Amino acid sequence: MTAYDELMAFQRQTEALAQVAGRLGWDQETMMPEGAAAQRAEEIGALEAVLHARRTDPRIGDWLAAAEAPDAVARAQLRQIRRSYARAMKVPARLAEEIAATTSLAQGIWAECRSRDDVAGFLPTLRKVVELKRAEGAALAAGGDPYDALVDDYEPGMTGAAIASMFNAMRPRLVSLREKVLGAEAPHGLVGTFGHDDQLALARELATAFGYDWSRGRIDLAVHPFSSGSGHDVRITTRVSETDPFNCFYSTIHEVGHAAYEQGIDPAYALTPIGQGVSMGVHESQSRSYENQLGRSRAFTGWLFGQMREIFGDFGIADEDAFYRAVNRVHPGYIRTEADEVHYNLHIMMRFDLERALIRGDLDVADLEAAWNDRFRADFGVAVDRPANGMLQDVHWSCGLFGYFPTYTLGNVYAGCLVKALRAEVAGLDAMMAKGDVSAATGWLRDRLQRHGALYEPREVVQRACGFEPSEGPLLDYLEAKFGEIYGV
């Protein structure tokens, strides 16, 4: 065997173990008995110790030095391994294990405190997570900005300064659009009760319509919807509110976007470093385009209206046009995952500023709730009514996912570019979606982007798919055109 062959064989086992670790996390959020939390944290910590030892094995350095890359795929594999190896070598094994165990416990504590609106009960756990992530960021940054080092984990090559610059460019147009829309007459929203089982049945239909492969996946319930896995085992979750079926339906479509990306990657890349999504920004471009540009389009909501009428009967919405307006109703709500497209990125901008300040030490964990509430009132004009609708609403910080939030907006930006190119190339798209057929759109995304996995760098894979350099312009143009038309502004 060549050095490259030996390295890839070793890496395949590491990737398989990482999938096992992910499955433990999925089980914890969906099926694990409550009393197993402490043991699960120890299990995850032990597995992380094994993974860290493999990722820092000195043989990797020797293999990398000797390996020759015969083609573009091999070069991409080596690029990913070098990046992972360099990162792992900077993080002490004990720190990696402690982060894994602490965040495993923290998720359960967060969920319990969220259910009780108990900020005080959560703060000691959050403080420990922040301290650990600050230490990890400092180790990775090696004298640079710790937050940049954490962002790079989710979006290679991106920095806090670049994100802040993009957000500053987006904010004026978003705020202007919001003010115009909120000054116009709002459409009616849904009222009534929509049965739990009926919602899940329709959610399965929606997942199928968007190309989810059930032979390699399943759907379960979770407090905070997520997708897990890659290759031949990619699972999704959703949640159900009997007074808000859109929460279930669009959470499902969103997670199918993530899952379709992983299921759509070239099978030859399975259990290799490039056999997964290249970044969370690119991942979010799939989930957000599935959910919004496709799932909330006038054409597709016309089909969804018919499906809902068949299942739920008359639910107070007169016709397809009124339903489209209800689906896209703009309102300054508390919850990010339920936010309309106009407000969504403002939620992300707020979280970006807060978590960047936390990691840099400019904001103390004890002051986070007040900082959140002050910023929310300033940005949305509404006072937070309870912690579950405020700083306790998202699972990310309990999981230690600092640097993740900005990738949601970056994903929206990429989605704006991708769907602009998609619509220019796929004729008759709306006519197909009006019949519930999204295959032309999802097929285009699979062929142009998803199948490549991490073969290319994040911005490169988007540029290759679109044919132009990604920027925030197409997203903002899309939002202004769509909501300008809906609200007549």
Image: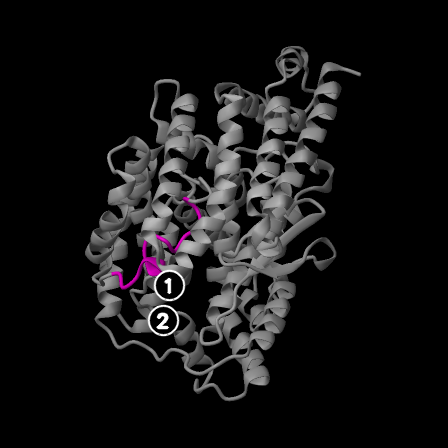
Element marked by disc 2: loop
Residue indicated by mark 2:
329
Rounded to the nearest angstrom, the CA distance separating label 1 from label 2 is 7 Å
- 302 lies above or below 429: below
Residue 174 visible in this rendered orientation of the protein: yes
Read off the magenta span.
384-397
- Residue in the image at 39% along x and 18% along y: 142
Q: Residue 280, how many percent across, how many down?
A: 49, 42
Say whether residue 40 is left or right of residue 489: right
- Residue in the image at 36% along x and 57% along y: 344
Residue 78 visible in this rendered orientation of the protein: no
Magenta region's main secondary structure? Answer: loop
- Residue in the image at 48% along x and 48% along y: 107
Amino acid type for the residue under numbered disc 1: Asp
Say whether residue 220 is left or right of residue 365: right
Residue indicated by mark 1:
340
- 403 lies above or below 13: below
Q: Residues within 10 Å of mark 1 (few under 14, many from 20)?
A: some
Amino acid type for the residue under numbered disc 2: Arg
Of residues 382 and 318, the one drawn nearer to the viewer in this rendering: 382
Q: Residue 272, how many percent across, how many down?
A: 68, 32
